Image (cartoon, rainbow, N blue to C red):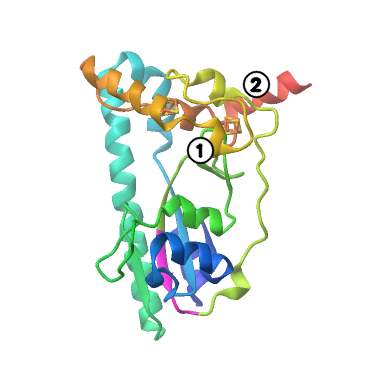
Amino acid sequence: MDIMQYTENLTDICGVAHLMEDKERLIETYGDDICKYPYAIVVGHLMDHDIIESIPLSYNDDKIAQDYLDEYFNSHQRAAKIADKIADFIKKQGFDAIVLDVSGDSDEVNLKMPFSNKASANIAHIGWLGKNNLMTTKEFGPRLTWVTILTNADLKDYIKDEQDSLCGDCKLCVNACPGNAICDDPDPRKSYDPVACGEYLKQRRDDGHPVACGMCLYICPYGNEKTAKLRSNAEN
Ligand code: SF4
Ligand code: SF4
């Protein structure tokens, strides 16, 4: 079994980022170590379906909000275990493999700043950054946790073509965001306002609720059969 067959068997979605493609920009941002390893395997692990489906109820039920918050962290731990298995498999094939943790860092590399797992998923062309600034896939929308494994194994045959944004005219996350933190602009650097999102979460905390809000993750029609139907009815 080759490295990517092994990876596919363990993951919900995965891809390969060719870090040399964007070498100069990556080195400028993260330092030389990021390109010691030419490839990154990017693994997407699905968050619990029932917990994500309950997000609309979480604003009036702290237990549901806390369950979502816990699942956010638990899914990262599950993804990290999967990544460790893949790294062990790669090492047994005679190559180097370094797992970046949930914050995008590792003791084994010297990075100027953590390498976002979302950025590696983007370079791997697994999906696109939605108007909500979440990595969004055709198959599961943004309902995924990401983890990155840097490696020197030759994975060029697994590089995918770029994935254009499929947001189009959709404004579901724009209209549903309780913090008014998303606007209708195709460029996620302009459409998503991290300050407004943070202020909303801070307000939730100050009001005594768990610091959890996942409406933009829940509502996306990619991964949500109910809102996908609504969107297609509205278009017809
Ligand atoms: S987490 Fe909540 S407040 Fe922040 S962008 Fe998403 S829906 Fe809006
Ligand atoms: S809800 Fe619609 S606009 Fe928002 S990220 Fe998903 S597809 Fe894009």
Instruction: Residue 170 in the image: state x and y as whole percent.
Output: 65, 27
Instruction: Residue 200 in the image: state x and y as whole percent.
Output: 35, 21
Residue appearing at x 47%, y 70% in the figure? 6
The residue indicated by pointer 1 is: 133
Residue appearing at x 23%, y 14% in the figure? 207
In the rendered structure, which segment of residues is drawn in magenta? 148-153
Observer-nearest of 119 and 211: 119
Three-letter residue code for mark 1:
Asn
User: Is residue 150 shown in magenta?
Assistant: yes
Does residue 181 sit above or below 7 in this rendering?
above
- Whichever of callouts 2 and 1 sits on the residue coming sooner in the sequence is 1
Q: Residues within 10 Å of mark 2 (few under 14, many from 20)?
A: few
Image side of residue 28 versus residue 68, left or right = right
Give the spatial CA distance, label 2 vs label 1.
22 Å
Q: Main secondary structure of the magenta part?
A: strand
The residue indicated by pointer 2 is: 230
Image side of residue 227 versus residue 119, left or right = right
Front disc: 2 or 1:
1
